[in-house]
Amino acid sequence: MTFPSRPEERFIDADGVRLRALLEGEGSPVLVLHGFTGSAESMESVAPPLRENHRVVRLELIGHGESDSPDTTRHYAMNECARQIASVSHSLALARPHLLGYSMGGRAAIAAAVANPNAFSSLVLIGATAGVADPVSRRERIRADEALADRIERSGIEAFVDEWMALPIFASQSGLGSEVLERARAQRLRNRPVGLANSLRGMGAGAQEPLFEELGGFVAPVLLVVGEHDRKFRAIAHDLEAKFPDARIEILEGVGHAAHLEAPEVFGRVVVAFLETVEGQRR
């Protein structure tokens, strides 16, 4: 099967906001969600191994890329984001898609799945959590995210992106090379300050209600992908595995938080095998 050199671009009215998506491939659908500061393009590496047998939809979440970035925070709340994801799935006639999310996109995927437990065939979560369960830690995270949001608006997108990419959690990405990192920086610079700031205020890890106790309601298979060097999220993955009824962990060796970006070929093989198993069980 041959594919167009460029994916199809679509803008979808999703529960009151306009969201951008890139679509490619044919077959059972996989809805892909990026992380904070990301875009549809930032998840490009997941598409090649999937589009051979799947309709891959890379969705741009509210406040990111060319999707809407409202001035008020109401549409950015995580429960609103979950409704937007479900609305996109319905508008594009995606029949029980597999839902794949990285970091913030993983949290959004969890929120959409627990709100609509029969709407998705499986979850693939990369370096994700279900929120911050401890009340003290959650208050601290809210304060930190509020301060960061103010700083984004005050100092501008370029200063923030350079600060963000220098965080220790992304240190392992240095091995990707300067060309890849510069392309990632350019992609992040296309975001709007108001969109990123309000994303932190509305759907940051502290702002969202923790969902650990709701995970038992999602009975479809879950794959938890985490990098070997991402110690924090390796521990979180074990917490999630214990809460989901049908979940397993896949640790990718030699990589950090963005496991799909740092080891795309290995990641692709793992996810393709997982989806094949899920779909084989449905037959």
Image (cartoon, rainbow, N blue to C red):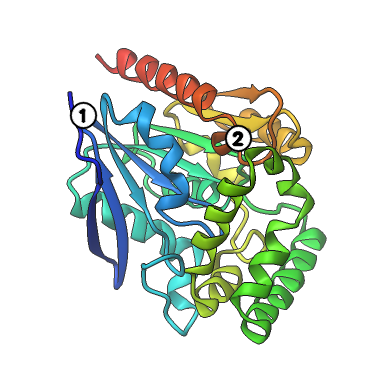
Residue at 66%, 33% in the rendered image: 237
Residue type highlighted by circle 2: Glu
Residue 31, by quadrant, is: top left
57 vs 226, left or right, is: left
Q: Amino acid at mark 1?
A: Gly
Q: Quadrant of residue 232?
A: top right
Residue farthest to the front, as pictured: 179
Find residue 243 and name its label: none
Q: Is tag 1's residue or tag 2's residue first in the polypeptide sequence?
A: 1
Number of callouts: 2
Q: Residues within 10 Å of mark 1 (few under 14, many from 20)?
A: few
Residue 73 in the image, given as x and y percentages of width and height: 50, 78
Judge by depth and name the residue closer to the eye, 189 or 25. Answer: 189
* Residue 22 appears left or right of 208: left
- Secondary structure beneath label 1: loop
Q: Quadrant of the N terminus?
A: top left
Secondary element type, mark 2: helix
Q: Residues within 10 Å of mark 2 (few under 14, many from 20)?
A: many
Depicted 119 relative to depicted 225: above or below: below
Mark on residue 262? 2
| Residue 234 figure quarter | top right
Eyeballing the image, is 148 above or below 249?
Answer: below
The residue tagged 1 is 27
Is 267 on the left or on the right of 120, as rendered?
Answer: right
Disc 1 to disc 2, C-alpha distance? 26 Å
Work out whether 167 lies above or below 141. Answer: above
* Residue 37 x, y percent position in the rendering: 55, 61
Q: Quadrant of the C terminus?
A: top left
